[in-house]
Amino acid sequence: MMDVRIYRLLLVVSAAVWFGFLIFYTVVSLIEGTVPDDLPERIVTYILSAGLTFGAGILTFRIVDRRGFWRWPAVLLIALAALLLHAAVGVAIYVYSPPTPAWMDYPPLAMFSSAVIYNSPVISSAFLGFAAIHYVRRF
């Protein structure tokens, strides 16, 4: 059974990577002299993404606590599934929200592929944080 402290750490890592990315994106846009047109959609997307990443983190820790050679390949599959799920959630939010100039002319498949590329560093950072928590806890 997982300790409550692990849940807190997973929540902190999940929230930190997504909200850090949101702050970075917003600050860069403000430095360029524009306010992002799609900021409300991004906020909703990143809140949902932080929750999904937290869930993936819990699943990851339940898997790495077991024994077997399949643990880390399973974690990589969870990371890949999380990346695809984040992209799908983001596309759904953008497709069903009022159109913004930033995304108005994009077909959904192009949005999905952009989201996969765009979210890869964020998901990778979260799972590296999960691995760090695992190894610190273990040793």
Image (tube, rainbow, N blue to C red):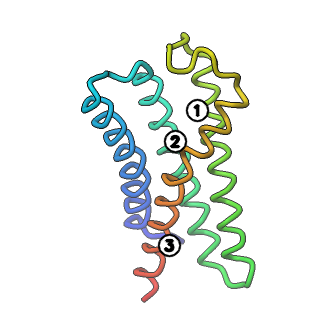
Look at mark 3 in the image and give the residue it sits on.
131
Answer above or below: position of 52 versus 37.
below
Q: Quadrant of residue 106?
A: top right
| Mark 3 and mark 1: Cα distance apart in space | 25 Å
Choose mark 1 or mark 2, whichever is in front. 1
Instruction: Indicate left or right for 39 with 77 as reference.
Output: left
Residue at x 63% of width, y 16% of height: 105
| Mark 1 and mark 2: Cα distance apart in space | 8 Å
Q: Nearer the viewer, residue 55 or 106?
A: 106
Residue 32 spot, x, y in % from top left: 29, 29
Q: Quadrant of residue 35?
A: top left
Q: Going by the picture, which residue comes out furthest to the front? A: 32
Residue at x 73% of width, y 84% of height: 69
SS at badge 3: helix
Look at mark 2 in the image and give the residue it sits on.
49
Instruction: Indicate left or right for 45 with 65 as reference.
Output: left
What amino acid type should be assigned to the residue bearing mark 2? Ser
Q: Nearer the viewer, residue 96 or 35?
A: 35
What amino acid type should be assigned to the residue bearing mark 1? Gly
Residue 8 spot, x, y in % from top left: 38, 59
Q: Residues within 10 Å of mark 3 (few under 14, many from 20)?
A: some
Instruction: Indicate left or right for 104 with 125 as reference.
Output: right
What amino acid type should be assigned to the residue bearing mark 3? Ala
Mark positioned earlier in the residue sequence (3 or 1): 1
Residue at x 53% of width, y 51% of height: 53
SS at badge 2: helix
Mark positioned earlier in the residue sequence (1 or 2): 2
Look at mark 1 in the image and give the residue it sits on.
90
Query: Which image quarter holds the C terminus?
Result: bottom left
Answer above or below: position of 99 versus 123.
above
